[in-house]
Amino acid sequence: MPRSVIVCSPSSRSYRRNERFVNTTQLEAVAAAFSTLARLHLHAPDGDTLAELQTIYPEWPLQESYTGITTAPETARGLQLWAASFNAHEDAEAIADDLNLLYGRTATAKIAPYESVHRGQDRLIFDEQTLEVRNFYRELNLEAPHLNREPDDHIGLEFDFIAQAATLWLTALEHNAPHDAERYRNAVVTFHKEHLSQWAPEFLENAEKLADTKFLQGMLALSQGALRMADSGLMDSGFTNIS
């Protein structure tokens, strides 16, 4: 997992619409955090990734020192849990076993990581929510990383969509392309409103209680903190370059 995935470089540029402002550092932080968390929901870290995370996790981007927004309590808890994990020398094998048991990779899941199971009428995978998520990817000419190998409404793939769409939004802002920026902003806000916010907060809270390792508990707490950041007002408006 590259260092750049979870570290945000400060930006001095700001954008506005209807007199509302956002610093690109905040959007960079959201994109970086959601990208990292998406990968960790989909794959347990190997030994090298775990060692790198141990070195750089104090630089987690969704902290007040990076965003200027008060650090969410879930984010603070997640970082404390990661510190406890590293101090306890939890290894990659133990974390992988925990993720397998939690999400049912090789056995019955403690908690299913699919939106359709939690929201669908029949509580089954590959229900309407799965296809809706796939359509969001297609509308932005994106493809879910595990297309045809994992239902598109896996919690990791929903986090990945926010990460990719937020990155496109940021790029459009930096290229002074307000119409594109509005398109990507609308995708992020609508997806969050219609999908993640409808099931992920409760899911993540319950999953944290069911995880055994401090590392996974921390990852699930950090995911809750990322969602709180998405709810913080950062995504309430579209933005136009004013620099």
Image (cartoon, rainbow, N blue to C red):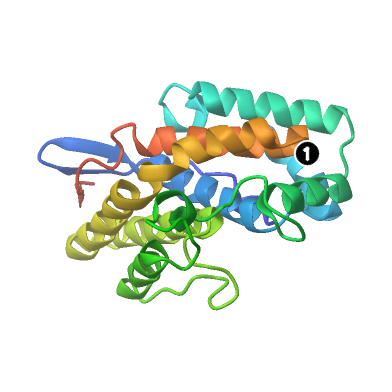
The answer to whether residue 145 is left or right of residue 102 is: left
| Callout 1: SS | helix
Asked if residue 100 is positioned above or below residue 201 in the image, the reply reads: below
Location of residue 119 in the rendering, given as x and y in whole percent from the top left corner: 40, 51
Q: Position of residue 222 (x, y in %)?
A: 57, 35
Residue 155 shown left or right of residue 189 in the figure: right
Q: Is residue 142 above or below residue 8?
A: below
State the residue in front, 137 or 207.
Answer: 207
* Residue drawn at (62%, 23%) of the image: 77
Front residue of this view, candidates 211 and 137: 211
Q: Quadrant of residue 174?
A: bottom left
Residue 60 in sight in this render? no
Where is the N terminus found, in terms of image quarters?
bottom right
Q: Amino acid at mark 1?
A: Gln
Residue 140 located left or right of residue 75: left
Residue pictured at 39% horizontal, 56% vertical:
120
Identity of the residue drawn at 19% across and 43% down: 16
Q: Kindly identify which residue carries mark 1.
A: 54
Q: Is residue 188 above or below residue 228?
A: below
Farthest-out residue, left: 18
Number of residues whose C-alpha sits closer than 10 Å to that of mark 1, classed few (under 14), some (14–19) or many (20 or more): some
Residue 102 visible? The answer is yes
Residue at image location 67% in from the left, 45% down from the top: 110
Could you tell me residue 27's position as x and y percent?
Answer: 39, 45
Decide which of 37, 193 is in the foreground and name it: 193
- The x and y percentages for residue 99 are 73, 49
Furthest residue toward front = 122
- Quick check: 112 left or right of 135? right
Question: Residue 186's quadrant in the figure?
Answer: bottom left
